[in-house]
Image (spheres, coloured by chain):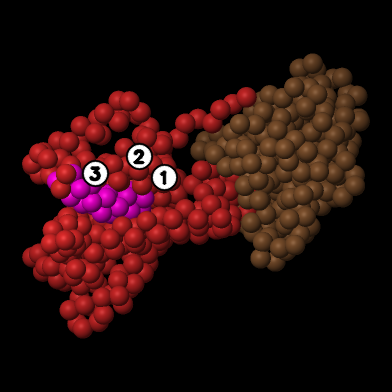
Amino acid sequence: MDTFLAALFSGSSRGAIYALVALGLVIVWRGAGILNYAQMGQAMFSTYIASTMITNGNSYWLAFVVAILVGAVMGVLLDILVMRPLSNKKKTELLSSESMRAAIPVIASLGILGALQALAGIIWAAEERGFPAPYAQEGFTVANNVMPFTSFDVFVITVVLSTLALTSLFFKKTGVGLAMRATALNSEVARLSGIRTNFTRSLSWAFSGAASSLAGLLITPTSNLSPNTLDLVLIIGFTAAVVGGLDSPAGAVIGGFLVGMVISFVSFYDTPEDVFLAILAVLILVLIIRPRGILGAKDARRV
Amino acid sequence: MLEVKDLVTSFGSVIALDGVSFTAQESKITTVIGANGAGKSTLLRTISGLEHPASGSITWSGKSLIGMRAEDIVRDGIAHVPEGHAVISELSVEENISMGSLFRLRKFKADVQAAQDEMFELFPRLKERRKQLAGTLSGGERQMLAISRALVSRPKLLLLDEPSLGLAPLVVEQIIDSINILCRTTGLTVLLVEQNANTALGVADHGVLLALGKVVADRPAAELKADANLRAAYLGY
């Protein structure tokens, strides 16, 4: 029973973080049609900035907010300086085919990931360092028993769930949210409706950058920080996004928690070495049963 | 007045519009007819800023539209209903409509609601289905929704691309009637692209006949309709 609870709790706090990462990927995929491999590179970079601020005596919370803002700004810069020029150049020979046009921004994002990791290595040295958690990472004690759940886990789940709830409200209830959804679903009709799609697209990048930076801040206390630590998080987050349905934000969240649970239960009941095998199995299983992911788009019913 | 002069639009080596010139008078319905591939849709797409012309000029009320982006051209009062019942299937009817007036929210907040209500009055079926996803609507309802989305931006000029495509004759009649009434009562200028020349010429004041990217006739609609030679040569009936 104790093992079960431990796996459940650890799975939900890990899953919450993967949900954030997957959501970041999905929002840019929907909004700009780009799989952003640099996403966790941006998160790594902003977490380093937070780490440096804390080392220099700033409060954790100031560093926390700054890192998220830096993540958002990096997302916007990536869009304006790299992605937009790349996808606008329709007439060059290189970009003449549709598939090349779709592939080039993705390859660019891989390049940016490499550049960010190299840059972080130069600035902060490539060795691992710890990153602080704002709350205790020891389990609660109930009647002299140490529970498998820490205050930091509570913090992670609360922050992520409220972020997800606010995001969903934002997309459903505000005009800007509607404009972002419209741009993602059909940018031509959005433009004809007077929506400035360049702006809404940049907002998607900002949102994704902020969400992944938040994920970086929440995962590094348990994983440590180095230029490459978050690579694995990107891979797991990507799996979560595909399992949930790459074009569905709600699916990303479900996929994130599902993958988190799988990882946690496998490492508690089996061995941590089998975790990736298990994720692969889940991925293949979902792709066989529902190739578009759990909540992937179905064609709307025509009457 | 919409004034198009020597407009050339090409896709790579394919010239879709080859020096098109015509004018559309204010508060009138001008229809652009012609066979498949004549360049009708490209003409509308170039006017609304979705395509950029290689040369030529487009002016609306004296202002040049060349080089402007589609999202800004709407804000200048030109709304485009593209071909194929262009609505966003994954959004609700209400969301599709309010999408068209998002840019007016800040300045004309009160009128945004009024415009939406007018659409529900014009097309009561949309009101019944306001919470439904647009993807669940019938073809005719989708076309009504696409038109509503365009109209809530309070355009002075409405560009309509093949509203009759794939619809039952009765529905076509209903939609064309609504447009006609709107034009006559509110002074809306309409540029109507149609393959169904008979329907279009029946309601329009003026007709422009396009063939292979060139204007071959530019006359009052009634005259065009009566010209059996032109019909036989270019429209095939």
For the colour red, the matching chain is A
Start-end of magenta stretch: A3-25
Residue sitting at 29 percent across and 63 percent down?
Answer: A155
Q: Residue B4 at x, y = what percent?
A: 74, 47
Disc 3 marks a residue whose amino acid type is Met
Q: Are marks 1 and 3 on the same chain?
A: yes
Instruction: Work out how far the residue at label 1 is from the one at label 2, CA to CA, in angstroms.
Output: 8 Å
Instruction: Work out how far the residue at label 3 is from the one at label 2, CA to CA, in angstroms.
Output: 14 Å
Q: Work out whether mark 1 precedes mark 3 in sequence or the reverse, and give the earlier one.
A: 1
User: Which residue position is annotated with label 1?
Assistant: A250
Q: Main secondary structure of the magenta part?
A: helix
Neighbor class of circle 2 (other Cα within 10 Å; few <14, some 14-19, many 20+) is many
Residue sitting at 90 percent across and 47 percent down?
Answer: B185
Query: Pointer 1 and pointer 2: residues touching (CB < 8 Å)?
Result: yes
Q: Residue A234 at x, y = what percent?
A: 24, 50
Q: Are marks 3 and 2 on the same chain?
A: yes
For the colour brown, the matching chain is B
User: Which residue position is annotated with label 2?
Assistant: A244
Residue B131 numbered tag:
none
Q: In the rendered view of the protein, which quadrant contains the C terminus of chain A?
A: top right
User: Which residue position is annotated with label 3?
Assistant: A261
Would residue B226 be seen by someone viewing this image from the given angle?
yes
Read off the chain for label 3: A
Residue sitting at 21 percent across and 77 percent down?
Answer: A54
Q: Work out whether mark 1 precedes mark 2 in sequence or the reverse, and give the earlier one.
A: 2
Q: Work out whether mark 3 precedes mark 2 in sequence or the reverse, and give the earlier one.
A: 2
Q: Residue A40 at x, y = what percent?
A: 26, 56
